[in-house]
Image (spheres, helix red, strand yellow):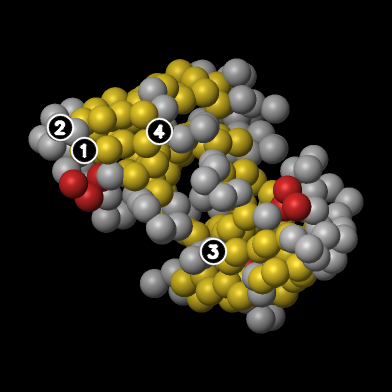
């Protein structure tokens, strides 16, 4: 199984400041078709998860452009250029290159 | 607008059974892989099962293999998860998911005597 390891697990951030979350996979996430099925999801308190980015760096519809993703192979990063109050929640990376699909442990973003 | 409306959660005794449903709308249900993801209280996310377009190919997490069955009815645009031989560790919110794109509102399953 591809084990996904996120850091940090807790991320206190001042409003308007940038934030960065790392996600490392125990195996390459390059699929045989050449795609990298690495996603980032946000789960606000009391809500269902919501996908922010797909295939490493593509923003979903309605996702602010302050969210960006990068990476390749086994190392990936989610960046928020300027944190806003609505960004509070838990962020998960998820791989769907191979079954079982797996998630990182989650990074809890809070406002300082 | 994509909607995934879940039903079927509740309290069940250890060893019991429960069926979750997920009624989909706003997209061509038959074309998409659909799955179930669960979240134990205060914990992270775990993929439970997935069923691909056509319904013939399915996958399960080792933790539920042989006890849970995923199915779909494309004529009703509905996804199901039949859960048998339930254990305390199956207690979680279960989310219906359209791949990773869209998520249902969640259904709480509590396994307790």
Label 2 and label 4: CA atoms lie apart by 16 Å
Badge 2 or badge 4: first in the primary sequence: 2
The x and y percentages for residue B19 are 75, 71
- Label 1 Cα crowd, 10 Å radius (few <14 / some 14-19 / many 20+): some
3 and 4 marks in contact (CB < 8 Å): no
Same-chain status of marks 1 and 3: no
Which of label 3 and label 2 is nearer to you? 2
A7 over A91 or under it: above or below: above
For residue A107, the mark is: 4
- Label 2 Cα crowd, 10 Å radius (few <14 / some 14-19 / many 20+): some
Read off the residue under disc 3: B106
Label 4 and label 1: CA atoms lie apart by 13 Å
What is the secondary structure assignment of the residue under circle 3? loop
Read off the residue under disc 2: A14
1 and 3 marks in contact (CB < 8 Å): no
Q: Which residue corresponds to the image point at 28% horizontal and 44% vertical from the top-left? A: A88
2 and 1 marks in contact (CB < 8 Å): yes
The x and y percentages for residue A78 are 34, 30
Label 3 and label 2: CA atoms lie apart by 31 Å
**Chain of residue at mark 4:** A
Same-chain status of marks 2 and 1: yes
């Amino acid at each position: 199984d591809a084990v996904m390891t996120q850091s940090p697990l807790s991320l206190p951030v001042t409003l308007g400041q940038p934030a960065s979350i790392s996600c490392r996979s125990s195996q390459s996430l390059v699929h045989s078709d050449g795609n990298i099925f690495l996603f980032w999801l946000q789960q606000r308190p009391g809500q269902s998860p919501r996908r922010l980015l797909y295939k490493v760096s593509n923003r979903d519809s309605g996702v602010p452009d302050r969210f960006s993703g990068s990476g390749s192979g086994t190392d990936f990063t989610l960046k928020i250029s300027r944190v806003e109050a609505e960004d509070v929640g838990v962020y998960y990376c998820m791989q769907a290159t191979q079954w079982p699909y797996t998630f990182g442990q989650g990074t809890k973003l809070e406002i300082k | 607008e994509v909607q995934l409306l879940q039903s079927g959660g509740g309290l069940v005794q250890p060893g019991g059974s429960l069926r979750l449903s997920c009624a989909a709308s706003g997209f061509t249900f038959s074309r998409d892989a659909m799955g179930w993801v669960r979240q134990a209280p205060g914990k992270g996310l775990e993929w439970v099962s997935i069923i691909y377009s056509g319904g013939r190919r399915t996958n399960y997490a080792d933790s539920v293999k042989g006890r849970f069955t995923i199915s779909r009815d494309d004529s009703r645009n509905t996804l199901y998860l039949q859960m048998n031989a339930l254990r305390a560790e199956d207690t979680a919110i279960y989310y219906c998911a359209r791949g990773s794109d869209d998520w249902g509102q969640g259904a709480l399953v509590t396994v307790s005597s």
